[in-house]
Amino acid sequence: MKSSIYSLTFDQMQEWLVEHGQKKFRAKQVWDWLYKKRVNTFAEMYNLNKDCQLVLEENFDLGTLEQEIKQESKDGTIKFLFKMTDGNLIETVLMKFSYGYSVCVTTQVGCNIGCSFCASGLLTKNRDLSSGEIVEQIMNVQKHLDAKGEEERVSHIVVMGIGEPFDNYDNTMDFLRIVNDQEGLSIGARHITVSTSGLAKRMYDFADENLQVNLALSLHAPNNELRTRIMKINKAFPLEKLMPAIDYYLEKTNRRITFEYILLKDVNDHKKEAEQLVSLLKDKRHLSYVNLIPYNPVDEHNQYDRSEKKAILDFYQILLENGINCGVRVEHGTDIDAACGQLRSKQIKKDKHKV
């Protein structure tokens, strides 16, 4: 099976072409066709010689994702369900903000982290995505924008879709380098955010990458007992291991980290949890931001409900009054299977019923 041509970084593209008897400068031409002109066939790359076109076509695929479903929300959010060459399904989300278009990408087929409130983990991990399959999500969304006939471009990326990015570390890092490269899409590193559930060992590696990419941590609880109950990863990486990794990241990069906190009714939304969160973050509040997230209910996780508006406001006020920078996430796509993984899970169930 051919691999996605979008899997290669610019340096890797140069090396590959030279190894296959082509000139190094061809890499710049190929990337121009891929990321700026956004062609759909190698034959359209008319400034490449026939030999170069042929060797590319023999070894690479220009499209390994097929759009299965496209859901459009009243607020302009679009959720895409893509089928890959092996039949697996993944989700990608396009969101429009005042500052531009942001795309949320998936890094794995399924997820093994097992957060008890999350739709992404309803189906366990099947495999990692290649860097090219992650890049192709951006390319497919960008081509959707191109088709509208407007000069709109994807300007922001959040790596927060199905899967744990740091459990697919090398492919995620290559993805970041590809979309950030000025020869290609040139999406600013500071416009990209990677979210992890807390793989502490990889957080040290990420700090050492010397990237300007933003980091978000799915925290969701301020103490080990509660965090372990709702996020089984806390057994492997409890707060005693997680917080030193955060300290290392902050010291190494001097970049702000976002702490994601989904508010679950009568689970983690009390005054005591807010105060514990203040205590946990007080020594790093100058480089911390807490993103309070209203919960999107998932049918299979019916033990959880969305926190009341008053509970959310009270929680927010406690953080704010104690000097913790925070906000409540603006919701997108609540009318189209808002929780990440819901659309994929529903489609897989439908397909099983058809058999």
Image (cartoon, rainbow, N blue to C red):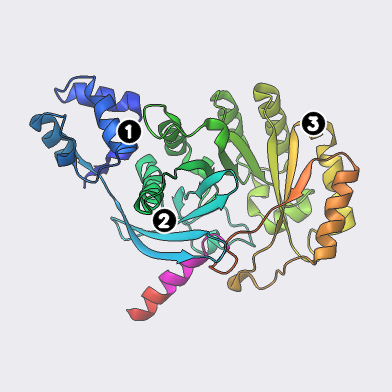
Q: Could you say which disc has been placed on residue 286 in the image? A: 3
Amino acid at pointer 2: Asn
Mark 3: few, some, or many residues within 10 Å (few <14, many ≥20)? few
Q: Pick whichever of labels 2 and 1 is earlier in the sequence.
A: 1
The quadrant the C terminus occupies is bottom left
User: Horizontal and vertical percent for residue 104?
Assistant: 51, 49
What range is drawn magenta here?
Answer: 338-349
Distance (Cα) linking label 2 and label 3: 39 Å
The residue located at (87%, 57%) in the rendering is 314
Q: Is residue 139 left or right of residue 304?
A: left
Residue indicated by mark 1 = 8
The span from disc 3 to disc 1 (Cα, nearest Å) is 38 Å
Q: Main secondary structure of the magenta part?
A: helix
Q: Considering only order in the chain, which callout, 1 or 3, is on the residue closer to the N terminus?
A: 1
User: Which residue type carries mark 1?
Assistant: Leu
| 151 up-or-down from 201: above or below | below
Q: What number is the disc on residue 126?
A: 2
Q: Which one is in front, 144 or 315?
A: 144
User: What residue sits 78% from the left and 63% below the top?
Assistant: 267
**Residue type, label 3:** His
Q: In front: 63, or 208?
A: 63
Farthest left residue in view: 50
Residue closer to the observer: 175 or 149: 149
Bin the neighbour count of mark 2 within 10 Å (Cα to Cα): few under 14, some 14-19, many 20 and up: few
Q: Is residue 124 magenta?
A: no
